[in-house]
Image (tube, rainbow, N blue to C red):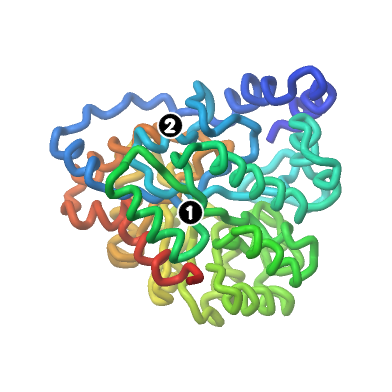
Amino acid sequence: MVAGLLAVLARLAPVGGRRIVEARVERRLNVLTGAPARRVSERARELHATLRVVDLHADSLLYGRDLLRRSAVGHVDVPRLIAGGVAIQALSACVRVPRRLNVERNEDTTDDVILLALALGWPPRTWSSNLARALHLAARAQAFADRSGGRFTIVDSATALSGYLARRETDPAITAGLLTIEGAAALDGDLANVDRLADAGFRLFGITHMVDNAFGGSASGAMKGGLTEAGRDLVTRLEDRGLLVDIAHASPATVSDVLAIARRPVVASHTGLAGVVPSPRNLGDDHVAGIAATGGLVGVGFWPVACGGTDAAAIARSIVHAVRVAGVEHVALGSDFDGAVPTPFDASGLVQLTDALLAEGLTDDEVRAVMGANAFRLFEQALPA
C-alpha cells in the first residue's frame, strides 16, 4: 500500500474517508491490466452459464465499499459476482501490511492497515489489535449478508452450504462468501484466538502474509524460515478445530514443514507457479504435487507475477501447468481480486477465463472442475457439519 497516500486519508477521514479510499486508493491499487477483453466463443458462454464458479481469495472487505452495490472501482461486489457466475467468493481478512511491501523481503516493523482503519473509521479497538481487525471484517461481511435480502450468504458449515446450493438451484442470481484469514498475525500471538476466529466464521487460515511471524516464515519475509514450534501447534489446532490450512505466502521451508505434518487437505488459496514464473512468491512443482497429495487445492492467481502475463490466456496457461503437475482435481482459482494487484478482468468477466481454458484444450469437465467443482468438493468434505 502507498503509505503517504493512506496517511493523508487518515487525516481526511472525518470528511469522507470511505469516498476518498474508493476514489483514490482503489483506483490506484485494484486495477485492470488493460489487456483487451477476449471475444468469447458461444461454446464458452454456454458452458460458463452452467458453472458454479469458486474463487479462493479476494481482499474486498478491506476498503469500505458497499459490496451490495455495483462499483466502478475494484474487482468484486455482489452484482459483479452474480454477473460472473461466482457461486462462492472467499473473502479475506488482511489485518497487517508492511510499508513499501514487495515480494522479495519485508521487515515486520511497520503497519499500513492502521492508516486504512483510521481513514475508514474502524472501531478504536482495531487500532492496536490484529484480532479485532479480523473480527471487524467478519462483522462487515455478515452485515452485507443481513442487508442483502438473500442475494449474499456467508457459508460457514456443510449445512449452510447445502442450504445455499438448494436455493441457488432455483435462483442463480445469488452468491455467497467464505471467510478466510490472511496471516496468523490475526491471532495477536495467542493460539486460543483460533477459537474466537473460528466462532466468527473463518474457515481457511493462512499461516503467513508478507512478513515472517511467530508461527512461520513468509516467502516475502526477512528470514524465510520454517514453522516454529508455535507454528506446529497452530497447524494442529487449526486442523482439530476443522479449519483448512492455507500456505499462500508461506516460505518454501514453511510449506515443506506444513506438508510434513498435515493430516487434512492443505490449500494454497492464491499463488503462482515457479515452473511458469520464477519468483519467491510462487510455488515450485514439488510443493504443488505435495499439496495435491494431501487432497488439497492450488488456487492459481490472476496477476502478472503469478501467471506471467496480463490476459486471460496467461492465467489459463498457468492453470494448465498446475493441472499437469497436480492433476486436474487439485487446481482451482485464486484471483487475488482487490489485493492491490492488476488483473485482466473483474469478477463479472470470468467467462473470459472459461473461454481461455477451452482454447488451451481442457475439456468441459476439466474446466468445470477447475472453475469451481474442485473447491465445492473440498468444502463439502472439510467444512464443519
Kindly indicate whether the residue at mark 1 contacts the one at mark 2 (C-beta within 8 angstroms). Answer: no
Residue type at tag 2 = Pro
Mark 2 is surrounded, within 10 Å at the Cα level, by few (under 14), some (14 to 19) or many (20 or more) other residues, namely many
- Decide which of 125, 330 is in the foreground and name it: 125
Q: Image height check: is 12 above or below 335?
A: above
Mark 1 is surrounded, within 10 Å at the Cα level, by few (under 14), some (14 to 19) or many (20 or more) other residues, namely many
Q: Position of residue 385 (x, y in %)?
A: 48, 71
Q: Which residue is mark 2?
A: 79
Dot 2: element = helix
Q: Image height check: is 20 above or below 211?
A: above
Q: Which residue is mark 1?
A: 271
Q: Residue at x 21, y 31 (%)?
A: 40
Cα–Cα gap, marks 2 and 1? 26 Å
Q: Image height check: is 291 above or below 161?
A: below
- Decide which of 316, 331 is in the foreground and name it: 331
Q: Is residue 285 visible?
A: no
* Left or right: 209, with 307 as reference point: right
Q: Residue at x 56, y 82 (%)?
A: 261
Dot 1: element = strand
Chain-order first, disc 2 or disc 1? 2
- Decide which of 363, 62 is in the foreground and name it: 62
> Which quarter of the rendered picture does the N terminus lie within?
top right
